[in-house]
Amino acid sequence: MRRYVLTGTPGAGKTSILRRLGGLGHEVVEEAATSVIAQAQARGEEQPWTQASFIDEIVALQRQRQLAATGPVQVFDRSPVCTHALATYSGWPVSPALTAELERITSERIYERQVLFVRNLGFCEPTAARRISFQESLAFEKIHEESYRAFGYELIDVSAGELAHRVAAVHSAISGPTP
């Protein structure tokens, strides 16, 4: 089983790439933070990312989704290393749950050591779950890079550009050249 992480700054186009990869037959696993935010906002919490439990909720959902994935090649929109980057960016302590999950994914070699790093597109469009300026997203992108390198991952750049070219680059990296 090969598990790849697709990461990068908010608004870089990861979800669009992930959807196309799903259409090519790859098992894709959606980002947990967006789901945690959407569920909380549906309950009336306007800014769930300000809650102390936010990081641990993301960690729990990431683990649940990772354990549920069964395909021979899986592509994850973010990983616990991204959650580490989020905690760092937000100035929150790394919780015991996040520490335990980082230790698990490291010791069990859950994810491939090559991480597909989707580069920013030169802008960041706000959404209900993404309330970050482009300048802030660039700082967040740098923290993501630092976090992945600190945990021993190799970053494979997915350059800004046309969606089809980005999808082809990721598809090639995870399964060989496009037929």
Image (cartoon, rainbow, N blue to C red):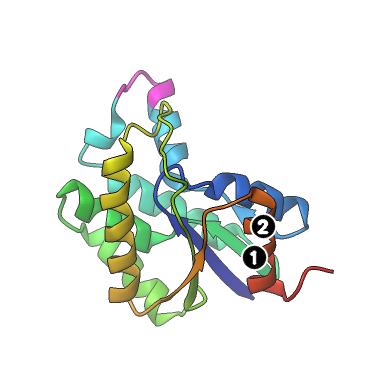
Give residue 165's mark: 2
Can residue 84 be seen here? The reply is no
SS at mark 1 in the image:
helix
**Please, what is the three-letter code of the amino acid marked with disc 2?**
His
SS at mark 2 in the image:
helix
Q: Quadrant of residue 168?
A: bottom right
User: Residue 134: x percent and y percent?
Assistant: 33, 39
Residue 66 is left or right of residue 170, and the answer is left
Instruction: Tell how many labels.
Output: 2
- Does residue 11 sit above or below 120 in this rendering? above
Q: Quadrant of residue 52?
A: top left
Identify the residue shown where x is 30% and y is 31%: 48
- From which residue to which does the magenta span run? 41-46
Mark 1, Cα crowd under 10 Å, few <14 / some 14-19 / many 20+, is some
Can residue 50 be seen here? The reply is yes
The residue indicated by pointer 1 is 169
- Based on the picture, tell me whether residue 176 belongs to the magenta stretch: no
Q: Nearer the viewer, residue 166 or 44?
A: 166
